[in-house]
């Protein structure tokens, strides 16, 4: 393939475009990459390949490309998988006879395949690594043409999407075979963002010859089943967005069995089969294999991740006995790492630089301090002014992040207050709070998947006007002003008793930090669905919310909100039904808050 953008006009990159991506992130929405990010990537590839008919790059990017062209040769092969599917790939091979490691990069789940992170490949090459990037099977633009046929973009791979299944694992080993023949590498690593990060972990655990020496997994998953449907609540909006983001119509991108499974997920049918399918695609299912191979693994994740929530990652990392590092950042999926993989950051790019330092150490033997890193590093919400600034705390394990637990009892509240209270003194029982279920409210996890979290990362967390929370459709419990700060560190757990006038309901719990002006920022949340209730009968429930690292200031208030619906999730709540929260003597309602 001589020109990955054949037939397309590539526009010149401006400094303003590059700066926008660095500051705003790579996503416009859950199903749209910022065109500026795509433009930078395409201009880099066209220039690197010598196919640009005019200068396309800023001076900084031109210099980077010139340096790589002097030191390496580039290629755009098609790698044939075991079943004949052809994978679109891109190579950067350093010149000279000196043995060098190779970094293999399966692309993320976007229509642009391997092209999007060309900037990262150039950076890796200048650090002394060969690079082999490829698009996993089925991913990439597939375009309808006038006569009813479909044409794949040059960076699109053949076949149908296996969603990090066995075929993707086999493909990963086939790509390693190709890399070994073409590069004769000294060592091998996988680096991935999002979809590619899960594939990298799975290939490292399953490659028949155990050839993977290190993994970098950015914005990744550990337990796909938990990510898709924890507590019987489906992340339906997430799956809808992903199905529409492969680059073509579902009937061409997924085989009939996968389409049926996705339809079952959408409609809430055969969920046991969906869970089994997802478990097979979960790195956490193979933690013992990873541990046996001792593969050094670097993770980068976010507290308010809407695709792959943080709790399943921290639990997986704690199970691993390999050399490991978990960075937890403010924001949502790909917000910390996406810009640094795509464009110059204009400053220190800590999330990606630390990922590259991991590879420098484990592939190139660099004595760069990585061996002394603590296994867990947490950026604390919201101590930053944007990016990687603010407080970061290190720990020897995730278990050590939480030092003690503080129990907050849900109380009836004062007679002159419309909300219940939160108190750490003694249990309060015998009260009830009712609301009408089935309606969306201003209490929500995010305004928009990815976009709200990108704003968090740049220092602009969403503000919630708590006076606008419609108490007819949710219940609220609020503490008094805190006499001293609370360092929330870990996984909160909520216990209460619920009954519904319907035979099923969904509860969504949110923990908020409320300032003196009664505006709030979200700390954490988690939904729970109860599909089989007896109407009017009490059910005691306990569920764990998402992991959090949050500093709650003195004089602020702690707020717990329970509602019945969030647009991120499926709901079993029946519109117009009544949900009642109670606190019986046999099980006083309480929120266990982990503190550091």
Image: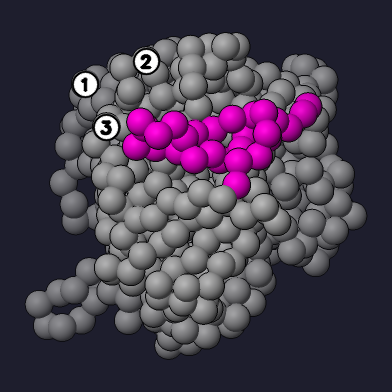
Image-quadrant location for residue 248: bottom left
Magenta residues span 403-429
| Quadrant assignment for the N terminus | bottom left
What residue lies at 59% left-to-right and 34% top-to-bottom? 548
Q: Residue 547: x percent and y percent? A: 61, 40
Considering the numbered disc 2 on the image, is that residue within a helix, a strand or a loop? loop
As helix, strand or loop, the secondary structure at mark 3 comes to helix
Camera-side mark, 1 or 3: 3
Q: Relative to residue 372, is residue 507 depicted above or below?
A: below
- Whether residue 362 sits left or right of residue 357 in the image: it is right
Is 421 part of what is drawn in magenta? yes
- Quarter of the rendering containing residue 22: top left
Q: Earlier in the sequence, mark 2 or mark 3?
A: 3
**Left or right of 362, for residue 27:** left
Q: Distance between the Cα atoms at labels 2 and 3?
A: 12 Å
Residue with the mark numbered 2: 516
Q: Which residue is mark 1?
A: 16
Callout 1–callout 3 Cβ contact below 8 Å: no
Identify which residue is drawn at 24% across, 20% down: 15
Residue receiving disc 3: 467
Residue 102: x percent and y percent?
Answer: 66, 43
Q: Which one is earlier in the sequence, the residue at label 2 or at label 1? A: 1
| Residue drawn at the location 34% of the way across and 37% of the way down | 418
Quarter of the image with the C terminus is top right
For the view shown, which residue lies furthest in the left direction? Answer: 146
Q: Residue at x 35, y 31 (%)?
A: 416
Camera-side residue of 490 and 98:
490
- Neighbour tally class for label 1: few under 14, some 14-19, many 20 plus, Cα within 10 Å: few
């Amino acid at each position: 393939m001589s020109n990955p953008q054949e037939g397309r006009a590539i526009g010149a990159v401006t400094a303003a475009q590059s700066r926008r991506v660095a500051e705003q992130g790579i996503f416009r929405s859950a199903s749209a990459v910022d065109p500026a990010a795509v433009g930078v990537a395409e201009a880099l590839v066209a220039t690197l390949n010598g196919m640009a008919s005019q200068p396309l790059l800023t001076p900084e990017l031109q210099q980077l490309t010139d340096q790589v062209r002097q030191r390496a040769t580039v290629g755009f092969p098609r790698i044939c998988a075991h079943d004949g599917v052809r994978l679109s790939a891109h190579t950067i091979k350093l010149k000279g006879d000196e043995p060098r490691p190779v970094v293999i990069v399966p692309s993320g789940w976007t229509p642009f395949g391997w092209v999007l992170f060309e900037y990262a490949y150039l950076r890796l090459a200048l650090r002394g690594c060969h690079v082999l990037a490829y698009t996993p099977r089925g991913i990439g633009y597939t375009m309808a043409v006038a006569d009813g046929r479909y044409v794949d973009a040059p960076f699109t791979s053949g076949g149908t999407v296996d969603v990090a299944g066995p075929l993707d694992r086999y493909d990963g080993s086939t790509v390693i075979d190709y890399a070994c023949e073409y590069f004769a590498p000294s060592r091998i690593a996988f680096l991935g963002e999002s979809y590619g990060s899960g594939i990298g972990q799975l290939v490292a655990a399953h490659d028949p010859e155990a050839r993977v020496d290190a993994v970098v997994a950015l914005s990744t998953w550990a337990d796909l089943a938990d990510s898709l449907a924890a507590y019987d609540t489906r992340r339906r909006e997430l799956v809808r967005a992903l199905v529409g983001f492969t680059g073509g119509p579902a009937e061409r991108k997924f085989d009939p069995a996968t389409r049926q499974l996705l339809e079952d997920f959408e409609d809430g049918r055969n969920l046991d089969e969906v869970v089994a399918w997802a478990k097979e695609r979960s790195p956490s299912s193979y933690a013992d294999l990873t541990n046996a191979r001792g593969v050094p693994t670097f993770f980068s994740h976010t507290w308010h991740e809407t695709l792959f929530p943080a709790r399943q990652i921290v639990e997986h990392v704690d199970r691993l006995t390999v050399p490991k590092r978990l960075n937890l950042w403010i924001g949502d999926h790909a917000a910390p790492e996406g810009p640094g993989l795509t464009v110059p950051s204009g400053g220190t790019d800590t999330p990606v630089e630390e990922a590259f330092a991991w590879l420098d150490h484990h592939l190139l033997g660099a004595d760069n301090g990585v061996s002394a890193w603590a296994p867990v590093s947490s950026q604390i919400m919201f101590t930053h002014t944007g990016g990687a600034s603010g407080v970061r705390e290190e720990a020897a394990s995730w278990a050590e992040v939480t030092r003690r637990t503080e129990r907050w009892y849900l109380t009836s509240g004062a007679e002159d207050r419309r909300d219940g209270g939160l108190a750490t003194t003694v249990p309060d029982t015998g009260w009830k709070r009712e609301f009408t279920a089935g309606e969306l409210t201003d209490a929500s996890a995010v305004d928009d998947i990815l976009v709200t979290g990108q704003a968090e990362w740049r220092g602009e967390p969403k503000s919630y006007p708590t006076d606008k929370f419609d108490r007819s459709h949710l219940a609220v419990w609020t503490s008094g002003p805190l006499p001293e700060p609370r360092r929330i560190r870990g996984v909160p757990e909520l216990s209460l008793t619920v009954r519904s006038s319907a035979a099923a309901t969904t509860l969504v719990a949110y923990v908020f930090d409320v300032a003196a002006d009664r505006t709030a920022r979200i700390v954490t949340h988690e939904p729970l669905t109860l599909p089989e209730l007896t109407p009017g009968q009490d059910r005691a429930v306990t569920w764990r919310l998402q992991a959090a690292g949050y500093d709650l200031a003195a004089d602020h208030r702690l707020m717990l909100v329970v509602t019945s619906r969030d647009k991120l999730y499926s709901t079993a709540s029946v519109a117009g039904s009544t949900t009642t929260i109670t606190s019986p003597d046999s099980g006083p309602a309480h929120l266990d808050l982990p503190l550091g």
